[in-house]
Image (cartoon, rainbow, N blue to C red):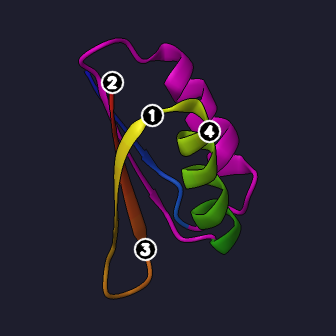
Protein backbone atom coordinates (compact mmCIF):
# COMPACT_ATOMS: atom_id res chain seq x y z
CA UNK A 1 0.00 0.00 0.00
CA UNK A 2 1.17 3.55 -0.69
CA UNK A 3 0.44 6.16 1.96
CA UNK A 4 0.59 9.80 0.92
CA UNK A 5 0.53 12.76 3.26
CA UNK A 6 0.76 16.40 2.19
CA UNK A 7 1.89 18.34 5.24
CA UNK A 8 2.65 21.58 3.40
CA UNK A 9 1.42 24.55 5.37
CA UNK A 10 1.23 22.59 8.63
CA UNK A 11 3.57 23.51 11.46
CA UNK A 12 5.56 21.11 13.60
CA UNK A 13 4.64 18.92 15.44
CA UNK A 14 1.52 18.17 13.33
CA UNK A 15 3.38 16.50 10.40
CA UNK A 16 5.52 14.51 12.83
CA UNK A 17 2.49 13.26 14.76
CA UNK A 18 0.62 12.33 11.57
CA UNK A 19 3.68 10.52 10.21
CA UNK A 20 3.96 8.49 13.43
CA UNK A 21 0.34 7.39 12.99
CA UNK A 22 1.02 6.35 9.39
CA UNK A 23 4.16 4.44 10.39
CA UNK A 24 2.14 2.44 12.93
CA UNK A 25 -0.26 1.35 10.17
CA UNK A 26 2.40 0.44 7.61
CA UNK A 27 3.35 -3.16 6.93
CA UNK A 28 6.24 -4.78 5.06
CA UNK A 29 6.23 -3.75 1.41
CA UNK A 30 4.33 -0.50 2.06
CA UNK A 31 5.59 2.94 1.09
CA UNK A 32 4.89 6.38 2.53
CA UNK A 33 5.42 9.67 0.69
CA UNK A 34 5.27 12.77 2.86
CA UNK A 35 5.60 16.34 1.60
CA UNK A 36 6.52 19.06 4.10
CA UNK A 37 7.69 22.67 4.13
CA UNK A 38 7.98 23.55 7.83
CA UNK A 39 11.61 23.94 8.91
CA UNK A 40 10.98 22.18 12.22
CA UNK A 41 9.46 19.17 10.48
CA UNK A 42 12.26 19.13 7.89
CA UNK A 43 14.73 18.73 10.76
CA UNK A 44 12.71 16.50 13.10
CA UNK A 45 11.25 13.92 10.71
CA UNK A 46 14.61 12.63 9.36
CA UNK A 47 15.92 12.49 12.95
CA UNK A 48 12.94 10.31 13.93
CA UNK A 49 13.37 8.06 10.90
CA UNK A 50 17.11 7.65 11.53
CA UNK A 51 16.56 6.93 15.23
CA UNK A 52 13.96 4.25 14.46
CA UNK A 53 16.01 2.69 11.63
CA UNK A 54 13.74 3.44 8.68
CA UNK A 55 15.09 3.47 5.13
CA UNK A 56 14.08 6.67 3.35
CA UNK A 57 14.99 9.09 0.59
CA UNK A 58 14.69 12.85 0.86
CA UNK A 59 14.40 15.34 -2.01
CA UNK A 60 14.08 19.12 -1.93
CA UNK A 61 12.38 20.79 -4.86
CA UNK A 62 13.04 24.25 -6.27
CA UNK A 63 10.42 26.03 -4.18
CA UNK A 64 11.44 24.65 -0.79
CA UNK A 65 9.16 21.66 -0.35
CA UNK A 66 10.76 18.46 0.91
CA UNK A 67 9.48 15.06 -0.13
CA UNK A 68 10.42 12.07 1.96
CA UNK A 69 9.79 8.52 0.72
CA UNK A 70 9.83 5.75 3.31
CA UNK A 71 9.92 2.06 2.36
CA UNK A 72 9.26 -0.87 4.68
The residue to which callout 3 is attached is: 65
Q: In which quarter of the image is residue 40?
A: bottom right
The CA span between labels 1 and 4 is: 8 Å
The CA span between labels 4 and 2 is: 15 Å
The CA span between labels 3 and 2 is: 23 Å
Frontmost of labels 3 and 4 is: 4
Quadrant position of the N terminus in the picture: top left
Element class at badge 4: helix
Q: Residue 8 in the image: x percent, y percent?
A: 52, 64
Q: Residues within 10 Å of mark 4 (few under 14, many from 20)?
A: few
Q: Against 13, is 23 above or below? A: above
Q: Residue, x 62% and y 39% (percent of image)?
A: 51
Quadrant position of the C terminus in the picture: top left
The residue to which callout 4 is attached is: 51
Q: Residue 11 in the image: x percent, y percent?
A: 71, 63
The residue to which callout 2 is attached is: 72
Amino acid sequence: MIYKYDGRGEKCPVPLVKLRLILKEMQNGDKCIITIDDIGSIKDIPKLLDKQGYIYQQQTNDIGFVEISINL
